[in-house]
Amino acid sequence: MGQLIMLGTLFGLIVLIFGLVIYLDPEARRGDANEKRR
């Protein structure tokens, strides 16, 4: 049972960090955003 909680927490942290990276860095999901700034 402890392994399930550890895996769930680890997976949740990975999803949270991935979501923050996409939210703070729009260039991560699409490259055309870089061309719009120039």
Image: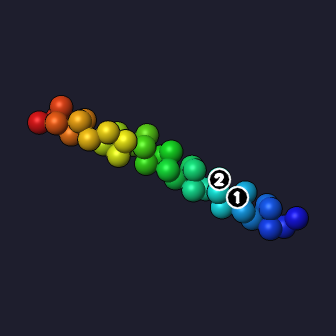
Q: Is label 2 in a helix, a strand or a loop?
A: helix
Residue closest to the far left: 38
Percent position of residue 5, x then y: 79, 61
Q: How far apart are marks 2 and 1 (CA)?
A: 5 Å
Q: Residue 37 carries which label?
A: none
> Looking at the figure, which quarter contains the N terminus?
bottom right
Q: In the visual, does 28 lie left or right of 10?
A: left
User: Is 31 positioned to the left or the right of 2 in the image?
Assistant: left
Question: From what the image shows, is residue 28 above or below residue 38?
Answer: below
Identify which amino acid the numbered label 2 is placed on. Gly
Residue type of the residue flagged with mark 1: Thr
> Residue at image x 75%, y 65%?
6
Label 1, on which residue?
9
Q: Which quarter of the picture shows residue 38?
A: top left
Q: In which quarter of the image is residue 33?
A: top left
Tell me: residue 1, above or below residue 25: below
Q: Is mark 1 on a helix, strand or loop?
A: helix
Looking at the image, do the residues carrying marks 2 and 1 touch, with CB atoms under 8 Å apart?
yes
- Left or right placement of residue 17 versus residue 12 in this view: left
Q: How crowded is mark 2: few (under 14 residues within 10 Å), some or many (20 or more)?
A: few
Q: Provide the residue designation for mark 2.
A: 12
Residue at x 52%, y 53% (from the top left corner)? 17
> In the image, residue 36 lies at what x, y percent?
18, 31
Circle 1 residues within 10 Å: few <14, some 14–19, many ≥20: few
| Residue lying at 80% horizontally and 62% vertically, measured from the top left | 4
x%, y% of residue 31? 26, 41
Q: In this view, does 5 lie to the left or right of 32?
A: right
- The one nearer the camera, 14 or 24, is 14
Q: Which residue, as the protein is rendered here, is positioned at the far top?
A: 36
Q: Whole-percent x and y of residue 35?
A: 16, 36
